[in-house]
Image (cartoon, helix red, strand yellow):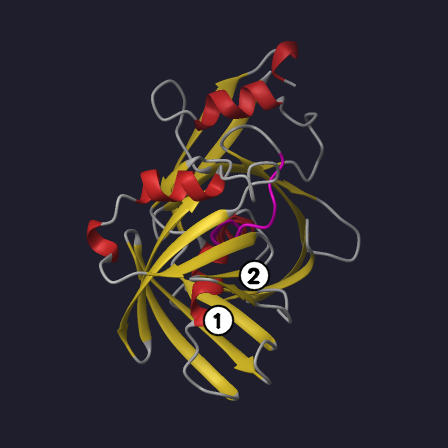
Amino acid sequence: MNLKLHKYQGAGNDFILLDNREAKTNILSEKKIKELCDRHFGIGADGLMIMNAKDDYDFEMIYYNSDGRVGSMCGNGGRCITRFAYDSGIKKSSFKFFAVDGDHESTIDFEKKVSLKMIDVNQVDFLLNHYLLNTGSPHYVKFVPDVYNLDVVKEGSAIRFSKDFSENGVNVNFVQTISEDEIYVRTYERGVEDETLSCGTGVTASALVAAHNDNGFNAVCVRTKGGKLQVEFEKSGENNFTNIWLSGPAEFVFQTTIEINKDDV
C-alpha cells in the first residue's frame, strides 16, 4: 500500500505528518516510525505526527518521538500540524484540536504565522540551580553564562539519564538572558536523545521562568538555533501562568509517497 507523507518544520524542529482522517491505515509500528525519522536511512525528523478525525474537534494530534514511541505534547509539533491541517483543506484562521495533554487552540494569521495555546502552568519548582516545570512535557531549565559554547548533548544527556530522571526522562533546556525581553535557548530532547534546533514546550518553559513582570502580561522573544519564537502569557502570583501562547513559523518542506507492507503497521 502507498502512503503519502509530508514534512514540515517550525524553527528547525522538523516532523513527518500523515493525514489519517479517513483511517486508511492502522497506526504505523514503532519500528517503522523510528526508520522514517532516521536522518541517514529514512526521511529524517525529530518526530512523526498522525492527524486523525475526532468528533467536536478539527482534528486529533498523535505525536511520536523519533525513537518510535508515543510522546508527550510537542509545541512546535502542534503548530506544524495546524499548518498541515490548513494546507490539507481545513481552511480556518482558528482551530480546536485534541492532543495527549487535552484541548488546544491554535491560529494562523494572514502572514501564516502559527500560534498555539499551551496548557496553564501552576507549579514551578526551583531546586539548587535549576527549575522544573511541565508545559505539556516535563522540562528542566538552567540558566548558564555562555549557552553558545556549551556542549548541550554531553551536559543534557548527563541530566536526562541521571538517577532523578532516568526512568521517565526529562527535556533539558540551557538558557542565557540576552536582554529583559529576550533569551537564547538550547534544548536536549528526550526521545530524540539529541539537541534539536528548537523545542516548543522547552521554549515555553524557559520563557515562563524568565518572566520579568511580577504580575500581568509578559512577552518574551526566544532565540534558538532554528530561529525565533515568541511566548506571551499572563502571570498571576509567583508560579501561576495562564493564557500562554507560543508563536512563530511553521512551514511545509516537501511531500513524498512510500510503500508500506503489513510489517510496517
In what element is the residue under mark 2? strand
Q: Is residue 243 above or below residue 94?
A: below
What span is in magenta? 70-77
> Can residue 129 be found in the magenta stretch?
no
Coordinates of residue 216 in the picture (x, y in percent): 52, 89
Horizontally, residue 86 falls left or right of residue 211, namely right
Q: Is there any visible trace of residue 146 in the rendered image? A: yes
State the residue lying farthest toward the left.
149
Judging from the image, what secondary structure is the residue with disc 1 in?
A: helix
Disc number for residue 29: none
Q: Provide the residue designation for mark 1.
A: 208
Q: Are marks 2 and 1 in contact (CB under 8 Å)?
A: yes
Which residue is drawn at the image coordinates 33% and 78% (left, top)?
181
Front residue of 185 and 133: 133
Q: Is residue 71 above or below residue 148?
A: above
Q: Is residue 29 left or right of residue 187?
A: right
Please tell me which residue is depicted at 44% across the width and 35% down the height of the picture.
193
Where residue 133 is drawn, which disc sits there? 2
Identify residue type, mark 2. Answer: Leu
Secondary structure of the magenta portion, mostly?
A: loop
Is residue 114 visible in this depiction of the protein?
no
Q: Nearer the viewer, mark 2 or mark 1?
A: 2
Rendered location of residue 79, percent (x, y): 50, 56
